[in-house]
Amino acid sequence: MRDLLSRRETAYRAESRPPLVLRGQQAPLDAAGDALRGGRGVLLYGPTGSGRTTVVEALAARFAPDGAPVLSCTPAQEDARLPYVALVDLFGQLPGEVFDALPPERARVLRQVLLHCRVTVEERDGLALRMAVTEALALCAQDGPALLVLDGLHWLDEQSADVLSFAARRLRGAALRVVATERVAPGGQPARPWCCPPGTAEIPLPPLPDDDIAALLAAAGGEPLPPQALRVVRRIAAGNPGYARELARGARLEGALDADGSPRVPGRLRASTLAGARELPAAAVRTLLVCCAAARPDLTLLRAAGIAEAEAHLGAAEKAGVVVLGADGAVVFTHPLVRASLYADAPTRERRAAHALLADAVTDRRRGARHLALAHPYENEKVAAAVLAAAGTAHAEGALDDAAELARLAADRTPSGTGTHDARRLRAAEYACDAGRRDQCAQLARAVLRSSSSPRLRVAARIVLLRNAGQALEGLQDVLSGGFRDAAGDGVLTARLHHWAALRSLVLGDPAEAARHALCATTGEAVAADPVTGLSALTTLARVHSLTGRTEAARATLDRALDLAVREGDPRRRGMVRMRAMLALDDDQVATARSQLGPLLCDEGGSGRECVDYTSVEDHVATLLALVRTQVRAGDCRAAVRDAQRCARAAAEAGLVSAPALYARALAASVGAAADEARPLAADAVRASEADGDRLFLLRALAAQAQTALFEGSLQGAADAVGTLLRVREIGGAMGVADPPLLHWTADLAEAQVMLGDTEAADEALAEARSHVHGGTPQSVLAALERAEGLREAACGRAREGAELLAAAAARLRPLGLPFDLLRTLIALGTAERRARHRTAANRALSEALELAEAHGAVPLAARARAELARLGALDGGGAATLTATETRIAELVTGGASNREVAAKLFISVKTVEGNLSRVYRKIGVRSRTALARAMTSPEAFATPGPGAPGGRRA
């Protein structure tokens, strides 16, 4: 029977590719799988578009592999009135042998129903039909598990539902598993659980996170949505995958926004969403439209707008499932799409009327200005001036999105051909840039360039385009060149452009050129006339000094800029304060850095509470990145991971692919997450920096990538780290970088080279780093170099000297409040002592390291410490020789057929190092040829394999 059934094709067989299961669907899928394995049925429920069918298909593919019978039906709305149609769908899939195995009378009734010979069944035949269905389903599962899929209980016809519920109650304990789905209202419960067996697991499908919606739309193919359109789709879909797909399809065809900035909703989606609302009286629909137009609708606002019957109208809408009326009078739509659909469905004239009512009723100036603009969608100087004033207030209060929208509306309402039109478009472009609305900013700024002949406006528009590019300044040389032509003869405008040329040169990795342009922007009469540009250029010059190792010059230049900023009351002082905190951080002054960042984060403790007065999205991202860097140095790994996610979210909400935000996540994950999670984040940060042509953040992203590989503790991880850090050294050398982070990364390079057994290359890297050491070099840099030198000494057989250097490095770090640096050093010390078979000293260092790592959430180093302690416990005191990790890996590659040159290329070491290690392997194992080595390497008695990530290796 099973063979006959398995040959029947069903809708849930894998005909092409398995369904895309998103992260937010994994938990309900796993819960459903657990229920099925435990012998229970499953009922998945959620609102329209929640992905019920996708999860069921994935569940069926997982639970019913090839050959397992699956009976399925997916009823539609029109099927609900057709008696027994679900039974027809289900049992029409069965071979005739199933009917032949039933008692004749029961088989006859079942065949008659399936052939539509009968639409009603009398009492006696009704029992026979129920028993026939029960026995037929039992036959399907008599040789092993079978699946009955009812995808859509809400449209299951009453007759089929009655028969199937009878069968389900009597198949308890059988190998048949029921998987059903039901559509419910948002927040509702299933209405037909009685169709499923007793004990069925009822599993809700939650809304998907924004990342899942973006992944879903990307997997669907087609042109990628612009960032603003993607934001609109995610906001309106509110985690519903079906809605997101429909909205995205409409956005690609017609755009995401109407002329008034409201979301467009495709007609067929409106029709399905507004079925209940369209049954309401016209007056109630008009009241709902006012609620749609309002930011926070409630009864007080509606009465202020002159709607006397508001409460009665909302009561009717609540019964129709359109809104929920709170006890405090707040009006909440059952889903954001309902609100967007109601507004999109309304005639333009009625929308304007709703906004006119609200313009007079609201007390918030920003909202009132928006309603005023939308009530008058034509050129009107009085309206434009009022709306622009509100935009300025919003911007000053840190409401950047509101400021950008209001400034755009003001520019649109300004009479064309007037002297103020381009100026207002430029203001709107600046506010859009601050809010991260890059498409809108570029459109407005380029419109100014096309229409304005004013050098001041043209240069300002070009500067906005440069700001709008974020870190991706590489391809904007033409914008700068055009700016210098527009500014010819104007010292103030030329100074502004020199400042941006300095920033571009710095980002592209040319500090000398950056310094030249910055000095041009900070000298001459232009600075007195435009101190804002002067202080910005001073900040850039301070960054150049810091990057090239001139820390004291950087501090002095930054202090000069801060003094000027305080005198001018310029908000750019936030960036200067942030930079001063990073200078303190690089100098091991973690507490000072935290105290300086605290006010930028809106609280004295610097805990990272959200701030409302960021000057731009990039300011927000930069401040959170500074916080993450500080947390990593302070060893607050869990907080770093959390705030790095906030940083990425701030960029994503503005639709930005931000290299700094991606770097924040990569850096935090390298210290606070497992390698499998950290590796792709680091790769994303590297790709984003490369795409932007941003060599500054490319250095940092590569260093985070190398750190992630190095912390794995494996030989392959060390090889990956060496390859990446050699690239860091090459780029940094070409740029003339000599700041403390680069010295830390050079110490990491030497450590990785020691792990690979290439002590000569490690000596070279350490010598280069030592050449940059001076009296003001931070103690953490000296400790990092000592750590690498200690590991080198231990690797060269000088265990006592290596342990002394590592202990000195740990002692240097203890008073600095840098627990992450300390635990790295303790792991290195414990490993060296273990290899020297100093059990007590090794145990002391590794136990302290593990305690630190667990206390601070340093996931990868906690794993390293545990692995080393496990190896320490495995010491047997015997005299067996041990292969190092490098020797083991070289032996494996050689016995696999690799030449010495191929091994050297694979592990980023020299051929000479390979030859030396191979000679030691021969000596330790007691062989004289590659053939003998291959035989020894395959002998299970000869070697013991250490745990994962072991820097030790095989033991002979």
Image (spheres, rainbow, N blue to C red):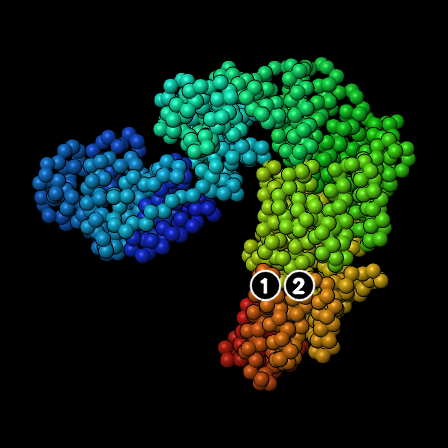
Q: Residue at x 56, y 70 (%)?
A: 867
**Quadrant where the C terminus is found in the figure:** bottom right
752 w.r.t. 287: above or below: below
**Residue 164 seen in the figure:** yes
Q: Residue at x 53, y 18 (%)?
A: 357
Element marked by disc 2? helix
For label 1, the residue is 855
Q: Is residue 324 left or right of residue 388?
A: left
Q: Position of residue 843 (x, y in %)?
A: 61, 76
Q: Which mark is residue 819?
A: 2
Q: Nearer the viewer, residue 362 or 909?
A: 362
Q: Position of residue 836 (x, y in %)?
A: 65, 79
Instruction: Judge the density around disc 2: few (<14), some (14-19), many (≥20) Cα neighbours within 10 Å.
Output: many
Cα distance between the residues tagged 1 and 2: 10 Å
Q: Residue at x 59, y 63 (%)?
A: 855
Amino acid on which the number 2 mark rests in the picture:
Pro
When asked about the image quadrant of residue 87, the answer is top left
Q: Is residue 178 left or right of residue 460?
A: left
Q: Nearer the viewer, residue 231 or 289?
A: 289
* Count of all numbered marks drawn on residues in the image: 2
Q: Residue at x 71, y 73 (%)?
A: 807
Element marked by disc 1? helix
Q: Position of residue 926 (x, y in %)?
A: 61, 82
Q: Are marks 1 and 2 in contact (CB under 8 Å)?
A: yes
